[in-house]
Image (cartoon, grey):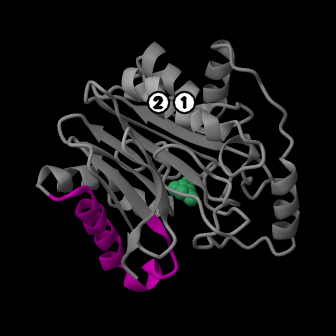
């Protein structure tokens, strides 16, 4: 692991971190995640490197590692986002295996329960405790999952920054809905001169303010990562304070000096940090 930290690239690190969580079938990101309201797991992911190369997939079904498909989009195509059936076709053509469409045991149970009322209601901070990994913005105390995203930002020994995001999106979303996670500037943004940021929570609110791009721009103005995240959270809350009380959004950022920070609307947003000096889970500060 030390070798990996010292010699690998940030791009490889964020992909590996995202793959780690996508591999878990009893979790909350990847094919083990909760389905949309039609009972289908659709995955969103993006990746961005220090040269502003970007790749993303949205609404990808039955492929285990959307982050790696996103990386292939970045490295092998002239495009930046592939969606739905086209993303799946591209993945298969590039050697990814088509996995079963069956829901994981946990997700199957939760979906059956949800169908009784079929009510779309994002619930604050009920992400699955088992979510884990380097530079991860969420894992929580409660046992069940509703919204669930893994966002990672990393800096390598060359001082280069990269980031990746992977998610099954909001549980019970409309089929075809795309959140912030695969949208560069919303769920993830990297500017190798300034810093990198990622987000988790109600994607619609993050997209509305181009959340992670905003965080990076605040860092460009001289704000610390934590203050930059706070100012982006304030932007969401200012628009509709009553609505914000019912939502969770959290931002996580790191600047070029390797300083990091996070801020959320509500209590409960947690992130982990792994470096040569630290291996720790942090509670993010919050506004409400
Ligand atoms: N941001 C994700 C989305 O809106 C969900 C989450 O982070 O919980 O799809």
Q: Give the numbered dot on residue 16.
A: 1
- Residue marked by disc 2: 13
Location of residue 274 (image quadrant)? top left
Q: Are marks 1 and 2 in contact (CB under 8 Å)?
A: yes
Question: Which residue is situated farthest in the bottom direction here?
Answer: 242
Q: Is residue 285 left or right of residue 148?
A: left
Query: Is residue 228 rendered magenta in the image?
Result: yes
Whole-angstrom CA distance, mark 1 to mark 2, is 5 Å
Q: Assign the magenta stretch its main secondary structure.
A: helix
- Label 2: state its secondary structure: helix
Badge 1 local density, few (<14 within 10 Å), some, or many (20+)? Answer: some
- Residue in the picture at 43% in, 86% down: 242
Location of residue 211 (image quadrant)? bottom left
Q: Is residue 13 left or right of residue 240?
A: right
Is 147 placed above or below 101 here?
Answer: below
Q: Which residues are magenta?
A: 223-249
Q: Is residue 270 left or right of residue 6?
A: right
Location of residue 17 (image quadrant)? top right
- Residue in the picture at 46% in, 30% down: 13
Q: Is residue 135 left or right of residue 84?
A: left
Query: Is residue 207 rendered magenta in the image?
Result: no
> Residue 107 at what x, y percent from top left?
81, 55
Q: Nearer the viewer, residue 4 or 10?
A: 4
Considering the image in quadrants, where does the C terminus appear? bottom left
Q: Could you tell me if residue 31 is visible in this image?
A: yes
- Residue in the picture at 28% in, 29% down: 160
């Amino acid at each position: 692991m030390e070798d990996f930290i010292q010699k690998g690239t940030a791009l490889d690190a964020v992909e590996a971190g995202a793959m780690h969580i996508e591999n878990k079938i009893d979790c909350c990101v990847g094919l083990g995640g909760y389905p949309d309201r039609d009972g289908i797991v659709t995955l969103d992911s993006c990746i961005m490197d220090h040269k502003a190369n970007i790749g993303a997939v949205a609404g990808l079904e039955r492929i285990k590692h959307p982050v790696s498909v996103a990386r292939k989009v970045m490295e092998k195509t002239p495009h930046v986002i592939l969606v739905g059936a086209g993303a799946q076709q591209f993945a298969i053509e590039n050697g990814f295996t088509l996995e079963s469409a069956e829901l994981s045991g946990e997700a199957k149970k939760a979906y059956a329960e949800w169908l009784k009322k079929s009510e779309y209601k994002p619930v604050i901070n009920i992400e699955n405790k088992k979510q884990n990994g380097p530079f991860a913005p969420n894992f929580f105390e409660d046992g069940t999952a509703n919204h669930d995203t893994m966002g990672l930002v990393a800096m390598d020994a060359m001082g280069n920054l990269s980031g990746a995001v992977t998610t099954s999106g909001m549980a019970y979303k409309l089929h075809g809905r795309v959140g912030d996670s695969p949208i560069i500037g919303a769920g993830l943004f990297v500017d190798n001169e300034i810093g990198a940021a990622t987000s988790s929570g109600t994607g619609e609110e993050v997209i509305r303010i181009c959340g992670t791009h905003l965080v990076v721009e605040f860092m460009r103005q001289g704000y610390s990562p934590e203050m930059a995240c706070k100012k982006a959270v304030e932007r969401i809350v200012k628009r509709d304070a009553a609505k914000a009380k019912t939502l969770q959004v959290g931002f996580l950022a790191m600047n070029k000096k390797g300083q990091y920070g996070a801020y959320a609307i509500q209590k409960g947003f947690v992130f982990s940090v792994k470096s040569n000096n630290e291996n720790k889970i942090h509670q993010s500060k919050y506004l409400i």
